[in-house]
Amino acid sequence: MDTPPAPALAPAAAAPPAPPAVDPAAQRAFDDARRQLVAGRADLAQRGFEALTRSHPELPGPFANLGLIARQAGRLDEAAQALETATRLGPTQASYWNQLGITYRQQGRFEQARQAYERALQARDDYAPAVLNLGILHDLYLGNPTQALGLYERYLSLVPGGDAEVNKWVIDLKNRRPAPVAVHRKEQP
């Protein structure tokens, strides 16, 4: 489940110190770049976010959004680098860690994806997208159906109204039979 990161200045879920006040001009520039992105003008949004990374390199949101733009364009190394910067600057933003996990998964870096999703859940233990993505990672990429089942059930408990597709996955996992164990010719069953 690919979800966009929270706005650059969203409050953290935990109770860390309040973020420093942001220059109103920087907030306007960020909002303008986000509007460009939502309107499908990724090139203009990218220029806006890049300008913000130069003028306000301490803000994680522009880096996170540059990571999303790069990933959407298939530039996964660039996306990972931008999202790594976003998580370094905004370590309590679960959405940034989740997006980094998605990028690592797309790169085939499954262990790093797992760690990123887990960091998202350290930042906010009820962040449903990271719970779901970690479940998918365990299910489809790491071969841990028991872990996946627990995560899918946890995800469903966090989603008001449920999720029909994930309900099907839970049923499927509960009905799966373990792979047969190969017996060596000399061994007796």
Image (cartoon, grey):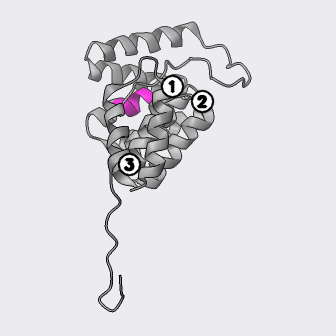
Q: Report helix, strand or loop for mark 1.
A: helix
Q: Amino acid at mark 3?
A: Asp
Q: Report helix, strand or loop for mark 2.
A: loop
Residue 105 in view, yes or no: no
- Residue 72 or 110: which is nearer the viewer? 110
Tell which circle, 2 or 1, labels the residue nearer the N-terminal end.
2
Q: Where does label 1 land, which residue? A: 158
Q: Amino acid at mark 2?
A: Arg
| Residue drawn at 51 percent across, 43 percent down | 116
Q: Where does label 2 land, which residue? A: 124
Q: Residues within 10 Å of mark 1 (few under 14, many from 20)?
A: some
Q: Quadrant of the N terminus?
A: top left
- Above or below for 30 versus 70: above
Magenta region, main secondary structure: helix
Q: Residues within 10 Å of mark 2 (few under 14, many from 20)?
A: some
The disc placed on residue 139 is 3
Percent position of residue 161, x then y: 42, 17
Tell which circle, 2 or 3, labels the residue nearer the N-terminal end.
2
| Residue drawn at 50 percent across, 41 percent down | 117
Residue that extends furthest to the right in the rendered view of this protein:
17
Q: Amino acid at mark 1?
A: Leu
Q: Residues within 10 Å of mark 3 (few under 14, many from 20)?
A: many
